């Protein structure tokens, strides 16, 4: 190894100010708007970005008169920078909270269809941790993955689709796609259905993300097609079309929980079985996970393999 490499000093640590400047420029794609957001002058912002690029030894932005774009290096470091800033901010908030209230915070995010799985377990855990501030947010799966990866959320419950390497997962359950059928429809009496049974039937699906893409792909592969398929944004609208007898709904099983009506039935779809993996998620520890987050994570991993909503008598805290 060359002597120069053996004696090379480690890079100086970027300052929080430099990292914050990078985050705002990456968000706004504009130096002027980023400077306004940070309440600083544009020359000072540009200087901070140049200092950071010098420290890292690479350009982070492509600049021209008309646009500002992240370079490949800028795209690569952006999630880590956001995580560092979010955890610094959260760390300051936790410090203030601990000094004032002797309390702590656990930030948990989930996709809407899994809230009923998560909430009962959290209610039991909260009983033995009354001073912990549990903050629960629901969001789309893509936003959840980003939130866990950048440190905005401590724990997430969502779909195991394109999980970043920096995120640790724990399997909870499979979520199968079901057919929601008007009660008087000829297919409502079947114990299960094949996708081919839906040929020429008017269908309705939710027009959201990867699950929608999976359903459309299987419909096309099985020769059912999508020419008679309606797409909607909300489950209430989907159930209204099914209840009226206008459509057969295709919906994940978790979205059918809590929706019971004599006007429709839910029937499993097979051949092929189409399912989504539901997982707990947290950013890989690397020794930096707060103790209260680790405790909540361990508790949820131990208990949430049981899909049945817990009672106060049966849930086991750790």
Image (spheres, grey):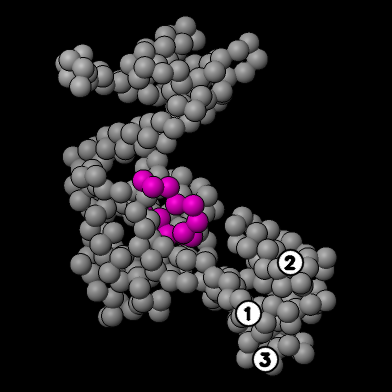
| As drawn, 254 above or below 64 | below
**Which residue bears the numbered disc 1?**
271
State the image coordinates of residue 212 (x, y, percent, origin top left): 65, 61
User: Which residue is drawn at the image coordinates 31% and 51% (left, top)?
Assistant: 106
Element on which disc 2 rests: helix
Pointer 1 with pointer 2, Cβ within 8 A? no
Q: Label 1: how many residues lie within 10 Å, few (<14), some (14-19) or many (20+)?
A: few
Q: Quadrant of residue 62?
A: top right
User: Which residue is drawn at the image coordinates 76% and 72% (left, top)?
Assistant: 223
Residue 156 circle label: none
| CA distance separating discs 2 and 3 | 23 Å
Q: Quadrant of residue 96?
A: top left
| As drawn, 50 above or below 128 | above
State the image coordinates of residue 23 (x, y, percent, origin top left): 44, 27
Whichever of callouts 2 and 3 sits on the residue coming sooner in the sequence is 3
Q: Quadrant of the N terminus?
A: top left
Between 216 and 180, the residue placed more toward the observer is 216
- The answer to whether residue 89 is seen in the rendering is no
Magenta span of residues: 155-166
Element on which disc 1 rests: loop
Q: Quadrant of the C terminus?
A: bottom left
| CA distance separating discs 1 and 2 | 13 Å
Eye-nearest disc, 2 or 3: 2
**Which residue bears the numbered disc 2?**
220
């Amino acid at each position: 190894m060359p002597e120069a490499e053996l004696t090379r000093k480690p890079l100086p640590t970027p300052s929080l100010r430099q990292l914050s400047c990078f985050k705002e420029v990456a968000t706004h794609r504009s130096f002027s708007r980023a400077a306004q957001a940070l309440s600083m002058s544009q020359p000072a912002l540009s200087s901070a970005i140049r200092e950071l690029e010098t420290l890292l030894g690479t350009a982070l932005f492509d600049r021209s008169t008309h646009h500002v774009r992240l370079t490949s290096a800028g795209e690569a470091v952006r999630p880590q920078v956001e995580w560092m800033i979010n955890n610094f901010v959260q760390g300051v908030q936790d410090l203030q909270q601990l000094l004032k209230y002797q309390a702590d915070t656990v930030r948990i995010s989930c996709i809407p269809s899994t809230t009923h799985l998560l909430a009962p377990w959290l209610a039991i855990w909260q009983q033995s941790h009354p001073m912990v501030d549990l903050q629960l947010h629901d969001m789309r799966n893509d936003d959840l993955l980003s939130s866990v990866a950048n440190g905005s959320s401590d724990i997430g419950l969502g779909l195991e689709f394109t999980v970043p390497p920096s995120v640790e997962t724990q399997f909870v359950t499979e979520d199968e796609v079901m057919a929601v059928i008007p009660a008087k429809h000829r297919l409502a009496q079947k114990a299960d259905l094949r996708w081919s049974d839906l040929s020429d039937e008017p269908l309705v699906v939710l027009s959201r993300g990867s699950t929608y893409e999976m359903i459309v792909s299987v419909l096309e592969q099985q020769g059912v097609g999508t020419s008679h398929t309606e797409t909607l944004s909300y489950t209430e609208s989907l159930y209204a079309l099914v209840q009226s007898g206008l459509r057969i709904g295709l919906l994940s099983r978790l979205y059918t929980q809590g929706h019971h009506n004599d006007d429709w039935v839910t029937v499993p779809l097979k051949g092929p079985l189409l399912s989504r993996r539901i997982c707990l998620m947290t950013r890989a520890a690397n020794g930096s996970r707060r103790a209260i987050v680790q405790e909540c994570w361990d508790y949820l991993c131990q208990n949430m393999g049981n899909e049945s909503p817990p009672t106060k008598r049966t849930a086991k805290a750790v």
